[in-house]
Amino acid sequence: MIVVTDTSVILNLCFLAQQKLLPALFEVVITPPEVKWEFERLAFQDDRFLGLVFPEFIAVKAPQNTLPSLRHTKRLQVGEIAAISLAVEIKAGVLLMDERAGRLAASELGLQTLGLLGVLLEAHKNGMIGSLKPFLDRLQNEARFWISPSVRQQVLRLAGE
């Protein structure tokens, strides 16, 4: 399956040193240049992500066109717009995205989305990683990744923890 990723999923997987999960779960991982630039900016400027390196296995491809329905929206950032446009253009099987507004926009366009927690849950179900609790703890405490208490509880329940 071909997937397109937005910044949050790949950035936080790299933070957890679990970026290898993406090529293990998906055949091809692609991202637009705007996402790579955002990743690199955060890896240079944000103390949480200092020194992270953008994974070489992720192909960088710009969408040929920005979807007209996304061109003037204020609710999405440029990386999200590019990732959604690219996912529609190449008919990606899944769009990897965490941000609620982006997931909603993608869903309205018929795209299937999966966030960071979904990727971790899939990896757990496939025996690629053990307990999810330490990953969730690190995400919340060190990366300052927001997870609502109900979502955290649901993810851990689905993982059998």
Image (cartoon, helix red, strand yellow):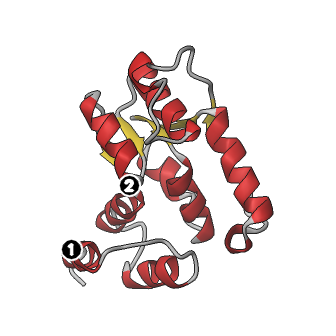
Could you tell me which residue is drawn at 72 percent across and 67 percent down?
A: 46
Q: Earlier in the sequence, mark 1 or mark 2?
A: 2
Could you tell me which residue is drawn at 29 percent across and 65 percent down?
A: 125
For this rendering, which residue is in front, 39 or 101?
101
Question: SS of the residue at dot 1?
Answer: helix
Instruction: Name the quarter where the C terminus is drawn.
Output: bottom left
Q: Residues within 10 Å of mark 1 (few under 14, many from 20)?
A: few
Give the residue at mark 2.
Answer: 115
Image spot of residue 40 (x, y percent): 74, 51
The answer to whether marks 1 and 2 mark residues whose Cβ atoms lie closer than 8 Å is: no
Q: In whole angstroms, how far apart are the C-alphas of marks 1 and 2?
A: 14 Å
Image spot of residue 126 (x, y percent): 32, 62
Q: Amino acid at mark 1?
A: Gln
Question: SS of the residue at dot 2?
Answer: loop
Q: Amino acid at mark 2?
A: Gly
Could you tell me which residue is drawn at 42 percent across and 46 percent down?
A: 96
Image spot of residue 74 (x, y percent): 47, 38
Which image quadrant is residue 37 in?
Answer: top right
| As drawn, 24 above or below 87 | below
For this rendering, which residue is in front, 68 or 89?
68
| As drawn, 140 above or below 126 | below
Instruction: Name the quarter where the N terminus is drawn.
Output: top left
Give the residue at mark 1.
Answer: 154
Per the rendering, the mark at residue 88 is none
